[in-house]
Image (tube, rainbow, N blue to C red):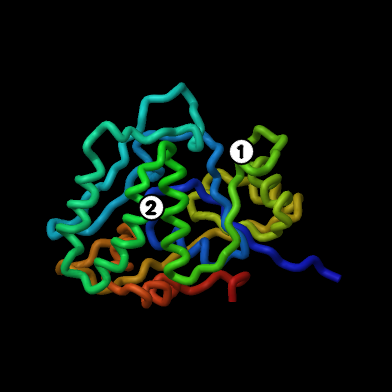
Amino acid sequence: MSKPKKSIAIMQPVYLPWLGYFEQMALCDEFMFLDDVQYTKQDWRNRNRIRTKDGWMWLTIPIKRGKLGQSLNQTRINHQLNWHRKHLAALEMNYKPCYYYSEIMGIYEAVFLTRPERLIDLTIPLIKAIADYMAIDTVFSKSSELTVLSEDKQERVIELCQLRGANIFYTGPSAQDYMEEQLYLDAGVQPVFQNYQHPIYEQHFKGFESHMSVLDLLMNYGPSAKEILLSSPKPEFAK
């Protein structure tokens, strides 16, 4: 008998991710937060983009200076800077006219206003809360919960897949630039590269800006967001 198929996506936690992040989550049996890798500056881990009348703007969480090479789950938020009001004010200014503004802000503020010390204690609960709103029932896990022996990046991912019993690894398209697919295949893991066709939908402001935070879609469409999110052709394993 052939081994049952189990798909997994393994992604670093991100502040208010874009639609493609949630597509990977929704299509896989398990979504693993890669929370014990090195934190990278000027990246998506602590910032994302929202729609404005002039195009888009960043919402960035300031980070405390830490030790060199610190991991994501060691990275702490700088709550001494006045960024909380800026984020809330920016969301109100740009999304308050949207029909689902109050509903989505309630979900956002329930996590945001707890002011957790670590970055992942803000980003992961926000992601989970948004997933729950969209009825995405994927199993969640964290890489830090597992004991991985390999220090090589690719072998480490393979080991994570094996430890979770996954034989399909759904990953972003940029992975094709560095992945040695045969390594995965030899280990019994089939890589599948995302080819997400970003939907065009009506935004509050005229024109369309792609690759905004998922909040943009949610503010405008509420419960219908999942259907729009998953309108891209699905990979074979998810059909």
The quadrant where residue 222 appears: bottom left
Q: Position of residue 55 (x, y in %)?
A: 18, 57
- Asked if 130 appears above or below 57 in the picture, the reply is below
For mark 2, give the secondary structure: helix
Q: Is residue 176 visible?
A: no
Q: Residue 225 at what x, y percent from top left?
A: 37, 73
Q: Can you tell which mark lies on residue 12?
A: none
Up/down of 78 relative to 204, above or below: above
Q: Which residue lies furthest to the right in this view?
A: 1
Q: Is disc 1 surrounded by few (<14), some (14 to 19) or many (20+) residues within 10 Å? A: few
Quick one: which residue is furthest to the top in this view?
67
Residue at left offset 55%, top offset 45%: 34
Point 24% across, 48% down: residue: 87
- Disc 1 residue type? Lys
Query: In the rendering, at what x and y percent does residue 42 appear?
Result: 34, 37
Residue for point 56% across, 69% down: 235
Where does label 2 land, which residue? 111
Q: Is residue 222 left or right of residue 55?
A: right
Query: Which label lies toward us, 2 or 1?
Result: 2
Residue carrying label 1: 153
Of the pair 28 and 106, the residue shown nearer to us: 106
Tell me how many marks there are: 2
Quarter of the image for the N terminus: give it.
bottom right
- Answer above or below: position of 11 versus 2: above
Mark 1 lies on a secondary structure that is helix
Q: Give the quadrant of residue 16.
A: bottom left
Q: For this view, does 225 lie left or right of residue 90?
A: right
Residue 95 at least partly seen? yes
Q: At which x and y percent is residue 63?
A: 35, 33
Sequence-earlier tag: 2 or 1: 2
Which quarter of the figure is the C terminus placed in? Answer: bottom right
The disc labelled 2 sits on which kind of residue? Val
